[in-house]
Amino acid sequence: MAPEATDANGVLFESDTATPDLGLKKTSVQIADDTPWAYDWQHVIQVPFLYVFGLYGGYLFLVAAKWQTGLFTCLLHLMGSLGVTAGAHRLWAHKAYKANLPLKLILLLFQTLSMQYSVINWVRDHRMHHKYVDTDADPHNATRGLFFSHVGWLMVQKHPEYERKSKLLAMNDIEGDPMLRFQQKYYITLLLLVNFVLPTLIPVYMWNESSINAFFVAAVFRLLVTYNMTALVNSAAHKWGHKPYDKNMLASENSLLSLAFVGEGFHNYHHTFPWDYKAAELGSSIYNLSTMFIDFFAKIGWAYDMKTVSDELIQKRVERTGDGSHNLWGWGDKDQSKEEVDAAIRIHPKDD
Ligand SMILES: [Zn+2]
Ligand SMILES: [Zn+2]
């Protein structure tokens, strides 16, 4: 078993919370060092192409594509997003719940639809992001700026600190999974098949869409949207929003982003309790479609052993490290003070 990485900043698994301070160091956010960027030229060329062709696909989506292609594109985007959030993120990176084989296969297919590296590589990057959040060992270190954390990090070589510390990261559970190794081994073939070949052929043969519309809308534009929604969690959610659970980090709460990206914008909560399968204090709702998805599969027995955080633990953490912005949801909220309850004016009161 690989040794645990040291000097960690963030909580990674439920066991990290065994320490009295819930695994967090008491250091404030560090500033990135001035190591020059070593460009990854393949991506420096590929990423702008994705943006240019993707925007052209967006134009076709608005003015030329058939409605069936538009609907199909939205469906693929939703599937790819859930593959990232419910699959690579909550299931594999954080082990926040367990899934049976059929659900794992669905999530693996969905995750491949996002074109965000194999699950093994995604998990390594994401565990590094949590364990060394906002430092040089974080692959999309937000202290390097909004552009870097959003997309710039894809176009440069990993920082030497990442290379050094990632060798010590515990990845045995992921690297030993035969299904994930299969995806890693045939990743390029699978990626081309599910992201480009099928999304082009299905609209052409099923509802007589033109191949140009099918390719640029259902494949390229869709991938651009899915990527940018995911990337906003790394960029915007590490820059704007409140910090009701822990003010000593950049990760922030952003409800708008949660609505747009299937429940992953409650980022201050998520970095505080990354092993909660809801990735938010909030459960199933339109703001948290990924939790709805997992809860649905839990009902039919395909998802199980979901971990979540007790109200008491949340309350203690909010009081100890929050920035004071943890809102009451209404009357009777656990954070409502006795003084406020006593001072409230109640008309025709009746307690059940
Ligand atoms: Zn983050
Ligand atoms: Zn996470």
Image: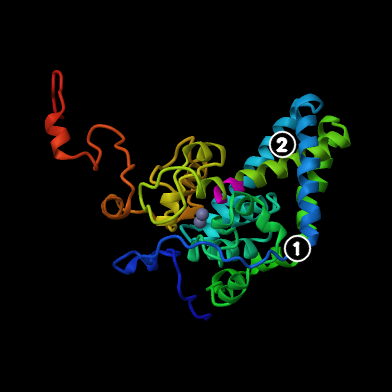
As drawn, the residue found furthest toward the front would be 34
Q: Position of residue 145 (x, y in %)?
A: 58, 52
Tell me the crowding category of disc 2: few under 14, some 14 to 19, or many 20 or more residues within 10 angstroms, Cα based: many
Question: What residue range appears in magenta?
Answer: 230-234
Does 218 appear in magenta?
Answer: no
In this view, 33 is above or below 62: below
As drawn, the residue found furthest toward the left would be 342
Residue positioned 74% across, 63% down in the render: 39
Please, what is the three-letter code of the amino acid marked with disc 2?
Thr
Q: Secondary structure at mark 2?
A: helix
Residue 273 appears in the figure: no
Report how far apart the C-alphas of labels 1 and 2 lie in the structure: 30 Å
Q: Position of residue 31 (x, y in %)?
A: 51, 61
Residue positioned 50% across, 43% down in the render: 263
Q: Nearer the viewer, residue 352 or 8?
A: 8
Query: Mark 1 against mark 2, which lies toward the viewer?
Result: 1
Instruction: Locate residue 215: give its quadrant.
Output: top right
Q: Position of residue 237 (x, y in %)?
A: 51, 47
Residue receiving disc 1: 40
Q: Nearer the viewer, residue 105 or 184?
A: 184
Sooner in the amino-acid sequence: mark 1 or mark 2: 1
Residue 199 appears in the figure: yes
Instruction: Locate residue 339: give its quadrant.
Output: top left
Q: Position of residue 139 (x, y in %)?
A: 60, 62
Residue receiving disc 2: 73
Instruction: Locate residue 221: give its quadrant.
Output: top right
Residue positioned 46% across, 76% down in the render: 6
Residue positioned 18% across, 40% down in the render: 337
Please, what is the three-letter code of the amino acid marked with disc 1?
Asp
Asked if disc 2 is less than 8 Å from ligand 2, the answer is no
Q: Nearer the viewer, residue 127 or 140?
A: 140
